[in-house]
Image (spheres, helix red, strand yellow):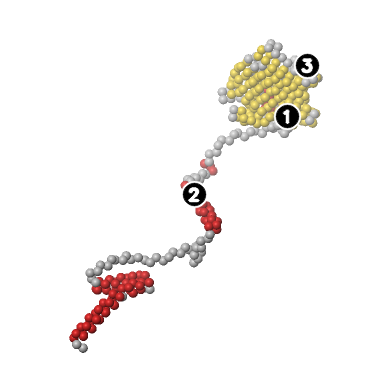
């Protein structure tokens, strides 16, 4: 072959090789879809840059940023390997209610846990260190109970005179002190009312712990008088106040007595003295002393237990104790009109009979009925 032919052949293969190198640019890019993501990008970039720069050094090719191919996202349900199927709106509303409810429950639970954690710890207290509030003193056991009623028939010089009713109304508070309310109703009847009419009530508030009265009230409608007598006791100062605002019907004027005097415990009024005597342990030959507030002054009372005897009453047969009360007045002892009281010799100490000698005749009172509710 001649030299010219050889040059032509060399030029032809050189041009052919350059054309092949340029044509390989597109198929190399298209191979990205076949080659794996990381390998294809690195080989393609290095090969293209080398060949293009060698063939066209003046051409500036912009750098393509490396990006990872994103795979399409598929919603995954709680069950593995199952795509989420979107239900229709009517069903979707029902389906979404349960997660919302569960969410609310979780939120409330979280709040409750947060509050519980925020509360301070209560220190453990030993039983011996617990400070208990002061308890009111226990009431003593007494022979009379709430609801007790005793009715006595009263006669004077052999004529029916009236009725006496003794009542235990129950417990209450008086100036912060637990007390028992005693009440005595007196009412005249029969021929006696023609000479002297009586319809009165006496109320006594009695402290069963200290065994002393707190208040005494006498209200009554009698022949010639409207009674309004009150006595109050202030044991913090050991003072008693007596007021008598009774109305005199004959003189048509109101008495105005208001006095204060010194009192010492133990002391009773005329009503509480009977109940106090019932709470004592009574034995023949024994003597008991206490004071009684009467008409704004204090008198000494002595109870002497004389004997035991059996008596018959309207409510049955009883073993009874005969008691004599004595009053000391102006230095002398008075037997209170030779008054005698029969009290049942049992745990109830029921007053069964009264007998007394007055200035004009004798007075008797006998039990007619007894009720303990």
- Tell me: 47 left or right of 128: left
Residue visible at 60% across and 21% down in the picture: 240
- Tell me where residue 303 sits by quadrant: top right
- Tell me: 269 left or right of 70: right
Of pointers 1 and 3, the one earlier in the residue sequence: 1
Q: Position of residue 27 (x, y in %)?
A: 33, 74
Which residue position is annotated with label 1?
Answer: 149
Task: Give the CA separation, mark 1 to mark 3.
Answer: 28 Å
Q: Position of residue 301 (x, y in %)?
A: 67, 22
Q: Alpha-carbon neighbours of circle 3 within 10 Å: few (<14), some, or many (≥20)?
A: few
Quarter the N terminus occupies: bottom left
Q: Position of residue 331 (x, y in %)?
A: 65, 16
Which residue position is annotated with label 2?
Answer: 111
Which residue position is annotated with label 3?
Answer: 194
Specify the label residue 338 is tagged with.
none
Residue visible at 77% across and 22% down in the picture: 162
Can residue 76 be seen here? The reply is yes
Q: Alpha-carbon neighbours of circle 2 within 10 Å: few (<14), some, or many (≥20)?
A: few
Residue farthest along the left direction in this orientation: 3
Of pointers 2 and 3, the one earlier in the residue sequence: 2
Between residues 220 and 159, which one lies in front from this camera angle? 220
Which of label 1 and label 3 is nearer to you?
3
């Amino acid at each position: 072959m001649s030299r010219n032919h050889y040059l032509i052949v060399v030029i032809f293969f050189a041009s052919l090789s350059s054309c092949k190198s340029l044509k390989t640019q597109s198929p190399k890019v298209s191979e990205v879809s076949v080659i794996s993501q990381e390998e294809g990008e690195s080989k393609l970039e290095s090969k293209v840059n080398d060949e293009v720069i060698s063939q066209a050094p003046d051409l500036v090719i912009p750098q393509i940023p490396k990006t990872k191919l994103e795979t399409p996202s598929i919603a995954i349900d709680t069950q593995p390997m199952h795509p989420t199927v979107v239900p229709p709106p009517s069903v979707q509303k029902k389906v979404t209610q349960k997660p919302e409810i569960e969410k609310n429950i979780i939120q409330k639970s979280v709040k409750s846990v947060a509050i519980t954690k925020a509360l301070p710890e209560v220190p453990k207290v030993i039983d011996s260190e617990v400070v208990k509030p002061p308890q009111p003193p226990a009431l003593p056991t007494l022979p009379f109970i709430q609801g007790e009623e005793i009715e006595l028939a009263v006669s004077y010089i052999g004529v029916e005179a009236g009725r006496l009713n003794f009542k235990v109304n129950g417990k209450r508070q008086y100036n912060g002190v637990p007390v028992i309310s005693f009440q005595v109703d007196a009412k005249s009847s029969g021929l006696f009312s023609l000479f002297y009419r009586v319809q009165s009530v006496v109320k006594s508030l009695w402290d069963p712990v200290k065994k002393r009265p707190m208040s005494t009230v006498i209200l009554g409608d009698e022949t010639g008088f409207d009674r309004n007598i009150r006595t109050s006791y202030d044991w913090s100062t050991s003072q008693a106040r007596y007021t008598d605002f009774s109305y005199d019907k004959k003189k048509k004027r109101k008495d105005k007595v208001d006095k204060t005097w010194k009192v010492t415990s133990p002391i009773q009024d005329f009503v509480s003295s009977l109940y106090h005597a019932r709470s004592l342990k009574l034995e023949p030959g024994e003597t008991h002393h206490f004071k009684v507030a009467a008409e704004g002054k204090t008198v000494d009372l002595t109870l002497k237990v004389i004997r035991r005897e059996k008596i018959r009453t309207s409510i049955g047969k009883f073993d009874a104790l005969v008691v004599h009360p004595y009053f000391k007045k102006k230095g002398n002892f008075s037997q209170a009109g030779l008054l005698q009281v029969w009290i049942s010799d049992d745990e109830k100490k029921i007053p069964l009979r009264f007998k007394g000698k007055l200035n004009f005749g004798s007075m008797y009172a006998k039990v007619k009925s007894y009720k303990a509710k």
